[in-house]
Image: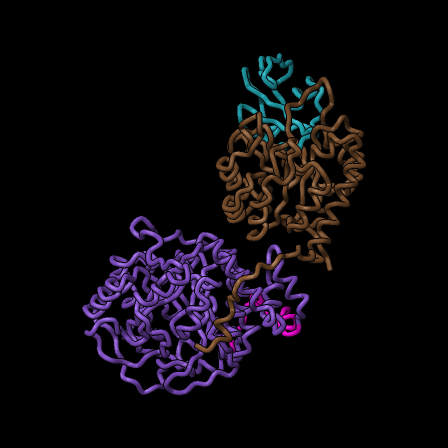
Amino acid sequence: MDLIVNGKPHLHQGHGLIAELLDEISAKPAAIAIVLNGEVVPRSRWAAVRLKEHDEVELLTMVAGG
Amino acid sequence: MSDALQLGDRTFSSRLLLGTGKFSGREAMIAAIRASGAELVTVALRRFNHDHDDDICAPLASLAGITLVPNTSGARDAKEAIKAAELGRELTGSPFVKLEIHPNPHHLLPDPIETYEAAQVLVKEGFFVLPYMPADPVLAKRLEEIGCAAVMPLGAAIGTGQGLTTAAMLRLIIRDARVPVIVDAGLRSPSEAAATMEMGGDAVLVNSAIAVAENPALMAEAFAMAVKAGRLACKAGLMPQSETAVATSPLTAFLTEVA
Amino acid sequence: MIGTRPASIDPTPWLDLAQHADRALVRQALAADAPGEREMAILLSPAASAELEAMARRAQALTRRHFGRTIAMFAPLYLSDYCSSSCTYCGFSITRNIPRNKLTVEQMETEFAALKKMGIEEILLLTGDRHSAAGFEVIRNAVERAARLFHSVNVEVFSMTGDEYRGLAEAGCTGMTMFQETYDPAVYAGLHLKGPKSNYDWRVHAPGRALAAGIRTAGLGALLGLTEPRGEMISLYRHAVELQRTYWRGGVSICFPRIRPQTGGFAPTFEVDERMLAQIVFAFRICLPDTPLALSTRESPHFRDGIAGIGISKMSVASKTTVGGYSPATEHSAAQFEVNDDRGVDEFCAMLRSKGLEPVFKNWDGVYREPLAAHAG
C-alpha cells in the first residue's frame, strides 16, 4: 500500500503492521515514536494498528537538542 | 543539611542542567555531560532518519544518574507542543518536559500564550512541566499557579551568549517564586551562571556556551564549579557594597524633638 | 482553648538575631540587595536603633521609588459598636457598660455624604465583632451603598467565611483589614476571653480566606503593646510575605496600631515607644519595599508629620472612632480608641504639601473593576 512516511511517499510491502513498517525502514522500535494521521500512537497500541492506503505516518526519535 | 533541587517529585544534587544540542559530535557531548555533573539533560524530537543513527537515548543510557528532559522545540503552537511532549514521554519514559514554543526562527523567543495553554494541558496529563518563558514576573506566577514544576525564564535569546540581559526581571521572578527558578538560554560564561545563583536562582540550563566552546568538557567543568560557587555564595550572604552617605538634615529629628 | 500559630509565620528561628544582632550585622542588613526575613530580624534589633537615621534614609528612598511623593488618604467610619466579644484592651468590649449604637441606613448615607464633602474617596467601614445588630448583611448592605459613592470601600470587621468575603467582594468591597492583635496564641487566649474573637485560628486565616475569595487587598497588623514586639513583627512580616506570594494578584498592606490610653485604662504589657514604632515602620519599608504601610490617627500630629513619606505611604485623616461622628446627625457614643491627631482634611493636607508630599484621595476609578476571580491559592 502507498503510505506517506515522514513526508515522503513509501511503498509498504507488508500487511499494515507497524512492526513491519519499522523493519522496512530499518528503524529500531525502541527508539521510535509514532504519529499516525496526526495522532500519537502509544507503543502499547502498535500491535493493534492496521495501516491503510494513504495513511500519513511520522516516525520520530529523540536526538540532541537544547 | 541537604541543598537538593526539588523538581516535581524528584530531587537532584546538581543545579546545572545541560542541553545536548550543537555539539560537534556524540563523544564531545558525552564528555561534556560527564564533566558537568548534570543530572538533567534535555533532548529533542526529530523525524527518524535511517541514513544516520541520530538516536540519543541509547548513548545517554550509558551514563549513570541522568534524567532525560525531552523538549518540544520545533513546536510552533500549543497543540504541536502537547503532541511533542507526549511523544517525548513515549520515547524516554521521563515525566519531565521542557516546554518550548518559539514560532519565530530568527530570535527563537518563547510564545507566552501558547506556552501557558500547553502547560495547562500537560500539567493535567501528569507531566512535570518546565516551561521556557520570557523573563516576565507575572507570567512566572501564572505558570506556577497552574502547576508547573519550575519556571525557566531566559537570560537572553537562545545562542546569543548575551548573558543576563533580563537580570532585573529575574530578580523579581526569584523573589516571588514558590517553585524553582531555572534560568535558561543566553548564558555565555561560567561567571554569569555564578551570578545567576548569587541572585538566588535555583538552577541554570546551559547549552550553547558549553557545546560551542573550544573545549566543551573543560567548559562544562567550569560551569559546574561556577554554579556550585554561586550557590554557596548566595547561602553565605554577600557583603554589602559600600554606600556613600549623603549629608542631609536628619530625618529622625522628629523622634527626639519635643512636639 | 489556645490556637495554633501557623509554622510559616513562626518567628522562633529569628528571635535570637532580633535580640542580639550587632551593629555590623545591621549595616550589612541595610545594604542587602534583597532584604528578607533575616534582615527583618536584624533591623528590628536593639542595635538597629542606633542606625535609625540610616534606616530612615533607606526607607524614604524606597518609599519614593515605589510610591512617589504621594500619601494615600482614607477615613474610617464606624457603623456600629455592638460587639459579641470581649477583648480586654478595647473600648467596645462586650464587658464594657457603654451605650451601644448603630447607624440607621439614613444616618449611614448622611455620614457618607459628609465624608465625600471632606474629599474622602477611600472609606474603611468598621464594626465590633459579629453581632445580631451588625452582622454580615448589615455590612454587605453598607458596602453596596458606599460603593456607589466611594472609589474604594474597605472593611475592618469580624472574621468571615469565604462565601461571606465573596459576597462583600461582589457588593463592591475592594479590601479588608484584620489585625491579628497578637500572633502569640497564648497571649491571644489571655486577651480574648469570650465570643467568636477568642478563636485564634479563625482570625489568623481570615486574610487568606478573603484574598482567596476575590477581595483585592488584605490589611494586616498586630496591636503593638500586647506582647514582645520583635517576635510579633517578625510573624507579621512572614504573614505578609506568605499572603503576597500566594495571592499575588491581590495585595497586602500593613498598619501599625499601637496601644494608646483609653477609657478602661488598659496598660500595654510591652510598651512600644515612638522610636521603636519608627524603627518598626522603617524595617518594614526596607524589607517590603512596595507594600503600602499605613498609620492611623492614634498617633500624635508630631509623629505623623515626621514619618509621613518615610516608610509610611498611607494615612487616615480627620478620623472619628465613635459610631458615625462626621455629621451632626449622629448621636454621641463611646470611642473605640482615642484619636490623637484630630486635624481636619485641609489642615492635614497642607502639612503634607509643606513637606513635599501630595495627598492622593483617589487612585483608581472603581467603576470598571470587578472582584477578582475566586482563587485557590
Between residue C296 and residue B247, name the one nearer to us: B247
Q: Is residue C11 magenta?
A: yes
Residues rendered magenta in the picture: C1-20
Check the rendered structure and report the hue given to chain A: cyan
Quarter residue C266 falls in: bottom left
Residue B27 appears left or right of C354 = right
The residue lying toward the viewer, choosing from C13 and C308, is: C308
Residue at coordinates 41% horizontally, 83% vertically from top-left?
C261
Does any portion of residue C207 appear in the rendered image?
Answer: no
Chain C visual colour: purple
Locate residue C323: give its quadrant. Answer: bottom left
Q: Is residue B2 left or right of residue C166?
A: right
> Quarter-wise, where is residue A55 in the image?
top right
Chain identifier, brown in the render: B
Residue found at x 61% / y 74%: C46
* Vertical placement of residue C366 versus C9, above or below: above
Q: Nearer the viewer, residue C257 or C83?
A: C257
Give residue C317's position: percent from left, percent from top.
34, 68
Spot occupied by residue A48 in the image (x, y as percentages of width and height): 59, 28
Left or right: where B99 falls relative to B198: left
Is residue C355 visible to the viewer in this orientation of the structure? yes
Q: Position of residue B102 (x, y in %)?
A: 56, 31
**In the rendered structure, does residue A12 fall within the stretch colored magenta?**
no
The spot of residue C150 in percent (x, y) is 28, 59
Q: Nearer the viewer, residue C305 or C133?
A: C305
Q: Determine the residue positioned at 50% across, 35% down.
A: B114
Chief secondary structure of the magenta span? helix
